Image (cartoon, rainbow, N blue to C red):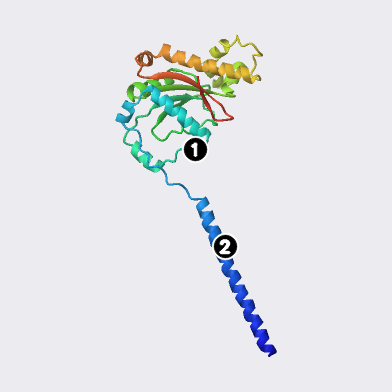
Amino acid sequence: MRNSIVRLLCLVSIFKFFMACQSNTSQKQTGDTTSTQAVIIPVPLRETVLTAEEQQALTPENVVQMLKEGNIRFINNNITARDHSLMVRNAALGQFPKAIILSCVDSRIPVEDVFDRGIGDIFVARVAGNFVNEDILGSMEFACKVSGSKLILVMGHEGCGAIKAAIDNVKLGNITSMLTKITPAVALSQDFPEEKSSKNNAFVEWVAKKNVDNAIKDIMSKSPILKEMAEKGEIKIIGAYYNLKSGEVLFL
């Protein structure tokens, strides 16, 4: 009798152990399913690279609006999913970008991402202090006159090291001659009502925006091709200012 009771208790224990294992397995499976769902990568959009016909149908105003909307998506961490492999292959057949953007070399400004643009969407020219020289002008003429872009955007940014160096009249190797392209903006900023120092963020911003204005004036005065296109309404030439802390682009 005692042996029968012992065997019965053993069977009960085994049954409870089996049921517990089943429960844990079920919970684990449920947890795994939830975990898998949490890391599912969305299927990339089959976005097509801009064609010549699509580019031709755009107006400069359309392109400005697209950049503004793209920046809002960037700020909200809502960047468009793209099939980059497909776009690389499609873009190899030709390029018809919407715009050319002149930006500083600052590594904190990923230009394409800032405007939520894909492969083949925009030309990007970069130089410390986003100033204009003949190489940049030639690139802009190629982008607009040859390749059909509708917009030139000159974009300065918050806390620009090149602007600060120009304010401080830094002398160092080739940086010295490079800064001569920016110092005109410093000279034009002497009407600033507060402390004119690289330590004054408000003054640095003031000079950076003057530098954008100066670059636009240089484009118009030094490139008859781009000036004529702008006067005919074929392109727009505008400025912008990037906020490092928020990622927002202020169109000037």
- The type of residue carrying mark 2 is Gln
Task: Name the one closer to the observer, 14 or 195.
Answer: 14
Q: Within 10 angstroms of label 2, few (less than 14), some, or many (20 or more) residues?
A: few
Does the image show residue 111? no
Left or right of 114 on screen, residue 90: left
Which of the numbered marks, if any, corresponds to residue 48?
none
Look at 54% across and 12% down and name the residue there: 184
241 w.r.t. 51: above or below: above
Q: Residue furthest top?
A: 191
- The type of residue carrying mark 1 is Asn
In the structure shown, which secondary structural element does the residue marked by tag 2 occupy?
A: helix
Distance between the Cα atoms at labels 2 and 1? 33 Å
130 w.r.t. 115: above or below: above
Does the image show residue 236? yes
Look at 57% across and 10% down and name the residue there: 187
Residue occupied by mark 2: 27
Left or right of 228 on screen, residue 2: right
> Which numbered mark, 2 or 1, is in the foreground of this view?
2
In the structure shown, which secondary structural element does the residue marked by tag 1 occupy?
A: loop
Task: Name the one closer to the observer, 2 or 75.
Answer: 2
Q: Position of residue 102 (x, y in %)?
A: 46, 24
Q: Position of residue 145 (x, y in %)?
A: 34, 21
The quarter of the rendered structure image containing the N terminus is bottom right
Which of the numbered marks, if any, corresponds to residue 78?
1
Q: Within 10 angstroms of label 1, few (less than 14), some, or many (20 or more) residues?
A: few
Task: Name the one closer to the observer, 199 or 17.
Answer: 17
Which tag, 2 or 1, sits closer to the chain's start?
2
228 w.r.t. 56: above or below: above
Left or right of 222 on screen, residue 28: right
- Quarter-of-image position of residue 233: top left
- Quarter-of-image position of residue 198: top right
